[in-house]
Image: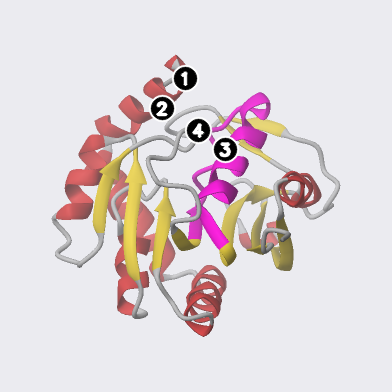
Amino acid sequence: MTEHALSVSRAYDEIAELYAEHAGSAFAVDPLHRAMVDAFADMVRSTGGGTVLDAGCGPGHISAHLVGRGLSVVGVDLASASLALARGMGSSAGFVVGGLAELPLVSGSVAGVLSSYSIIHTPPEGLSGVLAQMGRVLVGGGYLLVSFQSHEDPGGRVEAFDHQVATAYRYGVDEVSGLLGEVGVVEVSRSVVSGLEDPRRGFAQAHLLCRREWPSV
């Protein structure tokens, strides 16, 4: 585990309860984000369902939402205080301590992976490895939904920004889609919400839905 990852997890632990309240409220009032999460859940269920991973689950608000959509969920996060709050929500989701760069799951073991704004603290040099890990744990035909601060220009370059908790990065949608494609996770659909909808920073919000290709025989 890198020192960077440890510092981010410590920062979230220090504000766990405050962040849980903020993140849960923000998701509850964001119909566009919820629509993409619900579409992801429907796609997973259409292929027979199975366990899905909430990668960087934080306080577990989206894990609980996915359980409500009829899915079996395991959440992974490095912030132990956030995981304690997630376990206290009373949903049937299971929660495990772990990092995005080394997901503690067997290859091809989940039907879906959801990453809700969890890649934003990954420095550019680590992004390909994190996305490869998400692809590794997906079964063939499984779905991935990754959401992150982005640019309205799909080819926009990575840009660091001053996040309240820890340094964060916004990535171009084409870059994230391209890195996923390199590990056999191909884009199905994308939604890029205008920066006009972000009154704080004016950042576009990207939601990228992808599917793991079946291995060649």
| Label 1 Cα neighbours within 10 Å, binned few <14 / some 14-19 / many ≥20 | some
Depicted 197 relative to depicted 19: above or below: below
Q: CA distance from mark 4 to mark 1?
A: 12 Å
Type of the residue with mark 3: Val
110 or 1: nearer the viewer:
110
Q: Are marks 1 and 2 in contact (CB under 8 Å)?
A: yes
Q: CA distance from mark 1 to mark 3?
A: 14 Å
Q: CA distance from mark 1 to mark 2?
A: 6 Å
Type of the residue with mark 2: Val
Q: CA distance from mark 2 to mark 4?
A: 13 Å
| Label 3 Cα neighbours within 10 Å, binned few <14 / some 14-19 / many ≥20 | some
Q: Is residue 194 magenta?
A: no
Q: Are marks 3 and 2 in contact (CB under 8 Å)?
A: no
Q: CA distance from mark 3 to mark 2?
A: 15 Å
- Decide which of tag 3 and tag 2 comes sooner along the chain: 2
Residue pictured at 69% horizontal, 62% vertical: 213
Nearest to viewer (mark 1 / mark 3)? 3
Residue 70 position in % (x across, y down): 34, 80
Q: Which residue is mark 1?
A: 4
- Decide which of tag 1 and tag 3 comes sooner along the chain: 1
Q: Considering the numbered disc 1 on the image, is that residue within a helix, a strand or a loop?
A: helix
Q: Are marks 2 and 4 in contact (CB under 8 Å)?
A: no
Q: Quadrant of the N terminus?
A: top left
Residue 100 image label:
none
Q: Which residue is mark 4?
A: 101
98 or 121: nearer the viewer:
98
Q: Considering the numbered disc 2 on the image, is that residue within a helix, a strand or a loop?
A: helix
Q: Which residue is mark 2?
A: 8
Q: Which residues are magenta?
A: 113-139
